[in-house]
Image (cartoon, rainbow, N blue to C red):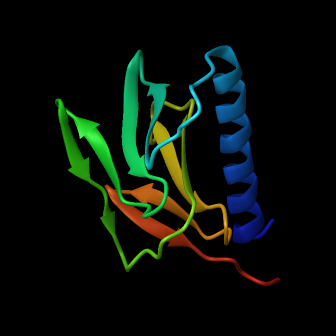
Amino acid sequence: MNRRTIALLFVAAALCHASVFAADSPAPQASGDFVIASAPYDDGDHITILYNRKSGASWFLLQNQWNKIKETSAVPAGNYQVVLTSSGQPEQTSWFGFRIDTNTGTTWRIKDRVWIAMDFVDE
């Protein structure tokens, strides 16, 4: 499998995992611009991200403070969704985070507290 296929399968698995998790504890429908996404990992810890659905701006929660997640380039206005999931492998990165502009399909992943754009590669 090429990198694009693996990346798309991973994002699809994360979205499915989030759907299953959401079915266990349904979240209220967001009516404003800001949404909180959270997922458990590592023995009860949680990763929690606050994000703006229209601008894509986002912050992670650390010790009762919202810390900005940096961008590698300007992010256009859009319709954003953030998905968080546990890796299920404590010896590696314990969680994964993805952001998608649902209008365009543009996708990012979090690495070292920075949103990294995911490229589409033609085969």
**Residue closer to the observer: 37 or 112:** 37
Q: Is residue 95 above or below residue 44?
A: below
> Residue shown at 65%/24% (left/top)?
21
For residue 101, what is the image quadrant? bottom right
> Residue shown at 38%/35% (left/top)?
48
**Residue closer to the observer: 32 or 113:** 32
Q: Is residue 71 above or below residue 91?
A: below
Quadrant location of the C terminus in the rendered image: bottom right
For residue 56, what is the image quadrant? bottom left
Report how many numbered discs are placed on residues in the image.
0
Q: What percent of the width, then of the height, locates residue 119?
A: 61, 76
> Residue shown at 74%/49% (left/top)?
12
Left of 12 or right of it: where is 112?
left
**Residue closer to the observer: 106 or 10:** 106
Left of 102 or right of it: where is 9?
right
Q: Is residue 59 above or below residue 42?
A: below
Q: What percent of the width, then of the height, locates residue 88?
A: 57, 30
Quadrant location of the N terminus in the rendered image: bottom right
Q: What percent of the width, then of the height, locates residue 80?
A: 54, 57
Q: What percent of the width, then of the height, locates residue 62?
A: 22, 36
Left of 121 or right of it: where is 65?
left
For residue 122, what is the image quadrant? bottom right
Farthest residue, direction front: 31
